[in-house]
Amino acid sequence: MKTREVFLSDEAIADIKSGRDFYDQSSEKVGDYFVAGILSDLESLSFYAGIHPLVHGFYRMLSRNFPFAVYYEIKDTQVWVVAVFDMRRKPEGIVDKLKSIVSGKKFKEPVAKYRSGKKNPPRKKTEIKLSHQAAQKSDFFDLINFDAPDHLG
């Protein structure tokens, strides 16, 4: 069976970190379960990359256990994961963020409009840069503060 190497962009790592932070608010174990589930999904890409539907120019794999989608592209024998998005977002925000990854331009996330009398504090501007530098698995686990299972590290 043909296998491919899977690489994560800096943006994808940041997406996984923010997902973990979100689930850690409930319980630290839920955050760990989230990371383990996403890593399992990413590991499956080495075998099944390319069978998923193309959405906005990228292959999209839906996570098995969480409402997240992995957007990736295939270059020769490598799979480049460009983003891991929470699918509970507004679809327009996902499309805009994917377009910004393709164009390499800065992306400003839309600010939600609330109807209360209070003014919302301004959001920090975020810049998205896609770097195609391969992250070693051990470096990745260090970044997200997760102990790699023996068979992955």
Image (cartoon, rainbow, N blue to C red):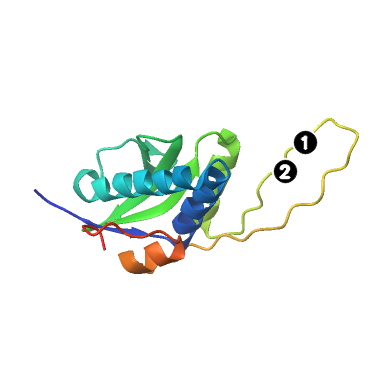
Residue identifier under label 1: 113
Is residue 132 shown to the viewer in this render? no
Residue lying furthest right: 117
Residue identifier under label 2: 111
Circle 1/circle 2 CB separation < 8 Å: yes
Please report the residue visible at 34 percent of the width from the left and 51 percent of the height from the top: 73
Residue lying furthest left: 1
Q: Label 1 vs label 2: CA separation? A: 6 Å
Amino acid type assigned to the residue bearing label 1 in the image? Lys
- Front residue of this view, candidates 135 and 91: 135
Quarter holding the C terminus? bottom left
Q: In which quarter of the image is residue 119?
A: top right
Count residues near mark 2 (Cα–Cα under 10 Å), then give few for <14, some for 14-19, many for 20+.
few
Amino acid type assigned to the residue bearing label 2 in the image? Val
- Front residue of this view, candidates 140 and 58: 140
Please report the residue visible at 53 percent of the width from the left and 63 percent of the height from the top: 129
- Front residue of this view, candidates 13 and 95: 13
Left or right, 132 with respect to 127, comes to: left
Q: Is 87 rendered above or below residue 3?
A: above
Q: Quadrant of residue 62?
A: top left
Left or right, 97 with respect to 8, comes to: right
The disc at residue 71 is none
Left or right, 110 with respect to 37, comes to: right
Q: Where is residue 148 in the image (x, y as percent from the top left)?
A: 32, 59
